[in-house]
Amino acid sequence: MQLRILSVSELNQYIKRVLTNDPILFNLKVQGEISNFKHHNSGHMYFTLKDEGNRISCVMFKSNAKKLKFKVKEGMKVTLAGYISIFERDGQYQLYANSMEPMGVGALYLAFQQLKEKLEKEGLFDKTVKKKLPYLPKKIGVITSPTGAAIRDILSIITRRFPNIHIVVYPVLVQGEGAAKDIASAINKANLDTELEVLIVGRGGGSIEELWAFNEEIVARSIYRSRIPVISAVGHETDFTIADFVADLRAPTPSAAAELAVPEYRELILQLEIRKRRLELIIKNRLNTLKDRLKAVETSYPFKYPMDKINTLRQNLDTNYQYLCKAMAEYPKELRKDLLFTGERLNTLSPLSVLSRGFAVAMKTDGRILRSVKDIQEDEDINLRLRDGEVTCLVKEIKVGKIES
C-alpha cells in the first residue's frame, strides 16, 4: 500500500483532529507554575506552565480571561482547566485554558486580597479622607435590592427611630452579572441629589460569590468619589468586603446601618427635656444670685446714704482750694527771695564789684583790655577804668617780671 503524501497543513490538521477527539486531552486539568506571562493588548493571555522538569505553552482567550476575578502574575501556581490542541501555523501543540484557579487559595479570595492591597496603597482606605455623618439627616438614600430583607429592615428601623425623615430608595441588582455596574451607577446618580445627606449601600448576608459585587473595583471607586457620606451595610457581622474598607462607616448589618444613620426620636425628646430642665435650673439659680446681689446693694451704706460720699468730696475740694490759695499767695514771695539771692550772686561776680574794692581795669585807647605788659609801650596812652570813671595815663616805664605784694 502506497502512502499518500501529505502537505504540512494537512498533517497539522490531522494531528489537531486526533488531539481534539481524545477524551482525556480534550477535557483535562493541569497544575503548574506560570512563567513568561504576557497579557496582550487584544485581551488574550499567553504564558508557559511548568513544573520541575517540563513545560507547556498555554493560551487563554479574552472571553475566558475577562471572567477571572484575580490578577494573574508571573510565578503564580495555578490549576488550569482546558484542552490540548495544535496551533496549525507553527505546528505547535499547546494548552487552551478555559478557566484558572490559584493553588492553595480560592480565586475570589485572591482577587479580594489583590484589590484590597491595590486600593490601600492608593489611599482609598485612609481614615483622614473619611467623611463624618450628620447627626440628624433630613434625607437618606438607600441603595440595595428592592425585594430583599435588607430594604425591609432598613425602612422599618429608620421610620421607627425617626418617622419624619425622607428616604429615597435606589433599587439595584446586588448579585450576579451587571450588579457591580448597577450599584456604582446608583451611587453616582444619588450624588446628583444635593439634598441627600447619607447613603446606605448594602444587602443581606450570603456567600462570598453572592456578595462579590461589593468587592468590585468599580463600586469601591464610586464610594470613594461620593460627596455624600456612605455607610456600607453588606452581609452579616463577620462578612467583610472592599466596600466596607472604602466607605466612611462600616455597619455590621443593614439593620445596624439604619440605627447608625439616624438617632432615636424618643431619645432626642428625652435629651431635650433633660436639657430644658437643666437650662431652667441654671436660669433660676442665676436669677436668685442676681436678686441676692441686688438686695445687698440696696441695703449697703452707700446706697442708703448716697450724699455722704458727695459731701465728703465737697469738703475735700474746699480744703484743697484753701491749700491752693495759700500756696498761690506764698509763691511770689518765694520767687522774690530767689531773685534777690541770684542778684547778689551775680553782683559778687560782676567786674564793677571788683572796682568798688579799689581795683582798676587797664585798657588801650581803642578799648581793648590790657592783659600783659607786652601789649603796651612806653610813652603810650592808656585808660584806667575806676569805680566812678576813667583816667587817661601816659606810660613812663615798663617793668617786666612778677610783682611782689
Image (cartoon, rainbow, N blue to C red):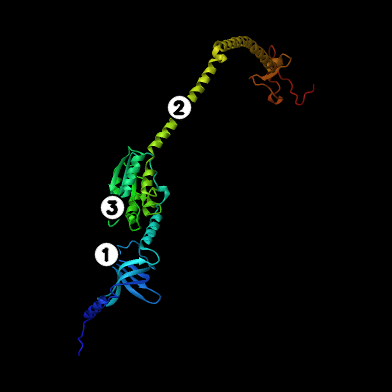
Instruction: Name the residue carrying label 1.
Output: 63
Give the residue furthest to the right.
405
Image quarter where the C terminus lies is top right
> CA separation, marks 2 and 1?
73 Å
Marker disc for residue 280: 2
User: Where does the image place residue 281, in percent across and percent down from the top left?
Assistant: 47, 27
Residue 110 in sight in this render:
yes
What is the count of numbered marks?
3
Q: Is residue 282 above or below residue 134?
A: above
Q: Which amino acid type corresponds to the residue marked 2 in the rendered image? A: Glu
Q: Which amino acid type corresponds to the residue marked 1 in the rendered image? A: Ser
Q: Is residue 295 above or below residue 43?
A: above
> CA separation, marks 3 and 2?
53 Å
Instruction: Name the residue carrying label 3.
Output: 173
Cβ atoms at labels 2 and 1 below 8 Å apart: no
The structure residue drawn at horizontal position 48% and vertical position 23%, both measured from the top left corner, is: 287
